[in-house]
Image (cartoon, helix red, strand yellow):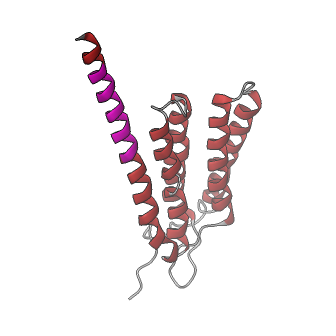
Amino acid sequence: MALAKSGVVWFLLLSRWVLGALVLIAVALWVLYQVRGGFGAGPANRFLCFAYLGLVPVMLGMAATPAGLLIPRAELHLLTMGAMGPVILAIAARVAMRRPKDGQLVPRSCHWGALCLVFAATVARCVAEVAPRPEFWMIAAGVCWSTAWSLFLWAHLSMIGRPPAFPLLSAKRLG
């Protein structure tokens, strides 16, 4: 009887993990499907789509963690650095994007550099969790993260001396 009960418990735990993994993989595929159209919607939306692509490895990492393929601390850094960081950067960067005469928002080169460095910091921080000697990877993650947000700040410093462009977070409506 005890063996049958433990078999039921293991079945429920395994089916819960499998169901959770399938849901997370489905969400990752949904994100890929949703952002595909945004790449043609203008430079600022393309920038935002690249940031949202950070959700895909996060969802896959969350699906892999219960199976022991990824340790929970790496999963935590994937979520906080790899999903939240790029999206916050992409939305907040809209205030300091260039605004050419056609009304579109255009990310500056320092915005693109910052986005790439946030992703690099995420990878370095996750590698630090599994590396036998994590010191190098921790330093690399810190340098990439700090440099990314310094670039973000650099773009905003150019905006301080002049009145803000309205609307702040979106392009000027044409027509």
In the rendered image, the residue lying farthest to the top is 2
Confirm whether the magenta stretch covers residue 15. yes
Q: From the top left corner, tell me how far across and down residue 138 is, in percent.
A: 70, 32
Residue at left 68%, top 58%? Answer: 113
Q: Give the residues in magenta.
A: 7-22
- Left/right placement of residue 82 relative to residue 155 reads left
Residue at left 40%, top 46%? Answer: 24
- Main SS of the magenta part reads helix
Confirm whether the magenta stretch covers residue 53. no
Q: From the top left corner, tell me how far across and down residue 65 is, in percent.
A: 49, 33
Q: Is residue 64 above or below residue 10?
A: below
Residue at left 60%, top 67%? Answer: 107
Q: From the viewer's side, name the closer residue of 90 and 100.
A: 90
Q: From the top left corner, tell me how far across and down residue 137 is, in percent.
A: 72, 34
Q: Is residue 175 above or below residue 50?
A: below
Residue at left 54%, top 29%? Answer: 71
